[in-house]
């Protein structure tokens, strides 16, 4: 049986926590991101996790025949590695050169772009692929959406981009009586799907340091015995990389667990390590993994989208982010970069108002202390983005703007979503709707009255 060990690596750019109290009056008045905190957090995690854990994995790759691991590293994390921990990138490159690691694709900004614009989603994935190739020297063949967000359309879209394998969560209601320990096929296309065994994954990710757990302490030989007794073709273990030293501190014994697990697995003839792509190619699909678009899953909280879009704070903030996208896209450059940084899923994750174990996890990650402060801070950041858009907007930017929502103009059975569409409309239509079109051009495309008159008259 293949043991697929998958490590998620991501660090966001956090917004400065006082931004909601000192709203900028002009673009550039205030730094939006709290880079002092971002650097401190990254350097702490780099020392406790990225260096130590990667050196342990590299040591295992040298000493344990056949040991392999799979990494998924966001573009934002790669940027921070390049700035503050380039030596870790060297360790990744060495693992890749030994054939002991696979690096998968994901969105560059670890974002919710899938729910805003498919073209933007494609661009962010392609950006991350280029970054992995440039900094690590590996061309991803497998992919995930942010936080294992998945439905049939996600799988087939990634498959159309050239990724043969997609990874996601093994959700009980989707699997039914079936086991997560097999390769599945996506509904609607030929993508191979690996689904996480969340029980065995959470034994490491959440329960490793829990002294109340009846299996505590968890040792490498005990865990390897559980793997050996697990039926199936493969077992897909996926956790945050920060598990090894940050979520569970070194004093918990997590590094020793990581050090000895490959050796304990190697002692058991039934088990062998594999990367995501290797496991997907070695075993035939046993069934179809069918997740309709209206029941999208993830690996967070209740295995749905509620970690990011579960309350009105989050949904309103996300609606404003989505509303601003066509303007940021039309401007490009620094404005689009700022919009993309604000599309990172963490900003919405901090705004969750959950209680119980899920609420404790959200609070652990949030630098703001409460969901309501996180919402105020994020709204202030979006306001700063609006200022950047208004300062840089021009008639040339309006020419590039394309809308695909309720901002399109509807009249006489005609739908117009861009200035190009407007020019394609016949003169009679433009004359009949002249007054409404002028108002539409000023309200939606942000043109002056004179610019709107010119846009309406030019064919």
Image (cartoon, grey):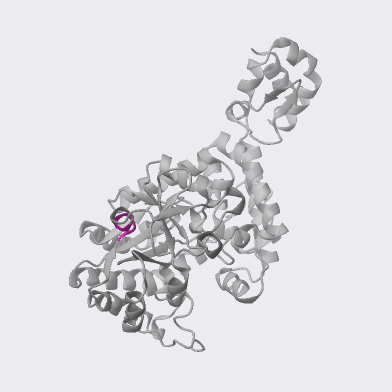
Corner quadrant of residue 255: bottom left
Q: Is 450 in the magenta?
A: no
Residue at left 27%, top 79%?
Answer: 264
Residue at left 66%, top 42%?
Answer: 323
Q: Which of 223 and 247 is in front in this view?
A: 223
Residue at left 49%, top 86%?
Answer: 213
Describe residue 149's horizontal placement relative to residue 391 as left or right. left
Chain part drawn in magenta = 275-279
On screen, residue 325 above or below 247: above
Q: Nearer the viewer, residue 422 or 386?
A: 422
Describe residue 221's horizontal placement relative to residue 325 as left or right. left
Residue 81: % across, % down:
37, 60
Residue 58: % across, % down:
25, 68
Q: Nearer the viewer, residue 105 or 379?
A: 105
Residue 350: % across, % down:
61, 64
The quarter of the picture where the N terminus appears is bottom left
Q: Is 277 in the magenta?
A: yes
On screen, residue 450 above or below 309: above
Q: What secondary structure is the magenta-colored segment mainly?
A: helix
Corner quadrant of residue 392: top right
């Amino acid at each position: 049986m293949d043991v697929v060990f998958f490590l998620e690596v991501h660090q966001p750019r956090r917004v400065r926590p006082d931004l909601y109290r000192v709203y900028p009056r002009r673009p550039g008045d205030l730094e939006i991101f709290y880079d002092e905190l971002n650097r401190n957090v990254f350097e702490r995690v780099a020392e406790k996790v990225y260096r130590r854990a990667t050196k342990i994995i590299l040591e295992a790759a040298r000493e344990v025949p056949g040991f392999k691991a799979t990494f998924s590293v966001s573009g934002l994390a790669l940027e921070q590695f390049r700035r503050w921990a380039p030596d870790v990138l060297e360790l990744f490159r060495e693992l890749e050169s030994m054939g002991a690691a696979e690096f998968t694709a994901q969105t560059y900004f670890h974002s919710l772009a899938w729910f805003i614009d498919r073209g933007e989603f494609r661009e962010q994935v392609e950006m991350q692929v280029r970054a992995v190739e440039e900094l690590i020297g590996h061309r991803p063949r497998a992919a995930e959406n942010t936080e294992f967000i998945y439905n049939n359309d996600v799988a087939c879209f990634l498959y159309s981009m050239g990724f043969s394998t997609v990874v996601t969560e093994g959700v009980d209601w989707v699997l039914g009586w079936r086991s997560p320990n097999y390769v599945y096929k996506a509904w609607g296309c030929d993508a191979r799907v690996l689904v996480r065994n969340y029980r065995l994954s959470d034994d490491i990710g959440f329960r490793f340091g829990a002294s109340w757990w009846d299996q505590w302490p968890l040792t490498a030989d005990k865990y390897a015995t559980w793997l050996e007794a697990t039926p199936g073709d493969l077992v897909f273990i996926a956790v945050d990389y920060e598990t090894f030293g940050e979520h569970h501190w070194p004093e918990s014994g997590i590094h020793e667990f990581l050090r000895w697990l490959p050796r304990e697995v190697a002692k058991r003839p039934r088990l062998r390590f594999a990367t995501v792509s290797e496991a997907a190619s070695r075993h035939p699909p046993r069934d179809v993994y069918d997740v309709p678009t209206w029941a999208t899953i993830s690996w967070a909280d209740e295995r749905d989208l509620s970690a990011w879009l579960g309350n009105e704070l989050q949904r309103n903030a996300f609606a404003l982010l989505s509303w601003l996208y066509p303007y940021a896209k039309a401007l490009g450059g620094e404005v689009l970069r700022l919009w993309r940084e604000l599309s990172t899923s963490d900003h919405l994750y901090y705004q969750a108002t959950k209680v119980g174990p899920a609420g404790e996890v959200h609070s652990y990650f949030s630098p703001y202390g409460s969901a309501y402060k996180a919402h105020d801070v994020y709204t202030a950041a979006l306001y700063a983005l609006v200022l950047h858009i208004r300062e840089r907007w021009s008639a040339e930017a309006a020419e590039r703007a394309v809308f695909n929502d309720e901002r399109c103009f509807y009249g006489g059975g005609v739908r117009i979503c861009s200035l190009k569409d407007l020019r394609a409309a016949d003169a009679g239509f433009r004359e009949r709707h002249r007054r409404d079109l002028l108002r539409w051009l000023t309200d939606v495309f942000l043109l002056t009255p004179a610019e709107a008159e010119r846009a309406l008259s030019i064919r």
